[in-house]
Image (spheres, grey):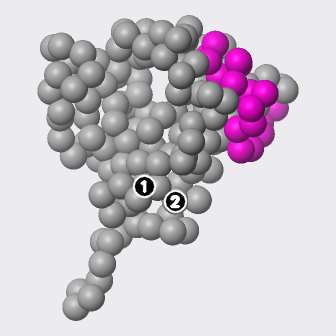
């Protein structure tokens, strides 16, 4: 099996990314539709760092990072196509993002839905700590859990 190739998202990746996200959970459960994704990816999110993972030439994953969030950066989205799951794509995308983020800041934040056990396990395995819940944030009866991975305090003593 080949390793994923990670690169900056390009406008011609849009259709594959929208299809990938529109066909998978947790986004279907959260009520996101292909129309929502088409608005977000027009053709790529503005003011964000966006990357795709290619596996055998196909878009297998996508990630979006917003810089400057709570003394760190925020991983707004990490999605892997159903057909590409359990093949290391998510881990490779996350590692790529972490390397970039930790060169410029000490903290990387993410959110995960409380019902999304596979994602919670994934982030836990990669060293993320649950900071706290945001109840009824996206859908009624469910919480988004704020996560954090850190390379150390944002400031040293006496700064």
Q: Please identify the residue farthest to the right as the structure is shown.
A: 57
Residue 35 among those drawn in magenta: no
Label 1 Cα neighbours within 10 Å, binned few <14 / some 14-19 / many ≥20: many
Q: Between residues 33 and 113, which one lies in front from this camera angle?
A: 33
Quarter of the view holding residue 133: top left
Where is 66 relative to 31, above or below?
below
User: Where residue 88 sits: x, y (%)?
Assistant: 63, 33
Q: Between residues 19 and 43, which one lies in front from this camera angle?
A: 43
Direction from residue 136 to residue 79 in the image, left or right:
right
The earlier-in-sequence mark between 2 and 1 is 1
Where is 135 relative to 63, above or below?
above
Report which residue position mark 2 lands on: 101
Label 2 Cα neighbours within 10 Å, binned few <14 / some 14-19 / many ≥20: many
Residue 12 among those drawn in magenta: yes
Direction from residue 128 to residue 97 in the image, left or right:
right
User: Where residue 127 sits: x, y (%)?
Assistant: 39, 49
Q: Are marks 2 and 1 in contact (CB under 8 Å)?
A: yes
Give the extent of the magenta segment.
Answer: 1-20
Residue drawn at the location 55% of the way across and 68% of the way down: 103
Report which residue position mark 1 lands on: 73
Q: Assign the N terminus to one quadrant of the image.
A: top right
Residue drawn at the location 83% of the way across and 26% of the way down: 56
Quarter of the view holding residue 114: top left
Residue drawn at the location 56% of the way across and 42% of the way down: 46
Quarter of the view holding residue 158: bottom left
Q: Secondary structure at mark 1?
A: strand
Residue drawn at the location 71% of the way across and 44% of the way down: 8
Q: Secondary structure at mark 2?
A: helix
Q: Please identify the residue farthest to the bottom as the structure is shown.
A: 158
Residue 105 tag number: none
Where is 75 relative to 116, above or below?
below
Q: Between residues 9 and 107, which one lies in front from this camera angle?
A: 9
């Amino acid at each position: 099996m080949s390793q994923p190739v990670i690169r900056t998202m390009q406008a011609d990746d849009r259709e594959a990314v929208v299809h990938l996200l529109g066909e998978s959970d947790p986004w279907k459960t959260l009520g996101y539709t292909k129309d929502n994704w088409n608005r977000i990816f027009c053709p790529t999110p503005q003011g964000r760092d966006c990357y795709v993972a290619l596996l055998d030439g196909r878009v297998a994953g996508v990630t979006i990072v917003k810089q400057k969030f709570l003394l760190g950066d925020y991983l707004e989205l990490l999605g892997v196509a159903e057909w590409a799951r359990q093949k290391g794509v998510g881990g490779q995308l996350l590692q790529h993002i972490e390397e970039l983020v930790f060169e410029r800041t000490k903290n990387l934040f993410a959110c995960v839905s409380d019902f999304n056990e596979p994602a919670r396990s994934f982030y836990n395995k990669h060293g993320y700590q649950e900071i706290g819940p945001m109840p009824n944030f996206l859908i009624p009866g469910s919480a988004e859990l704020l996560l954090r991975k850190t390379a150390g305090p944002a400031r040293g003593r006496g700064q």
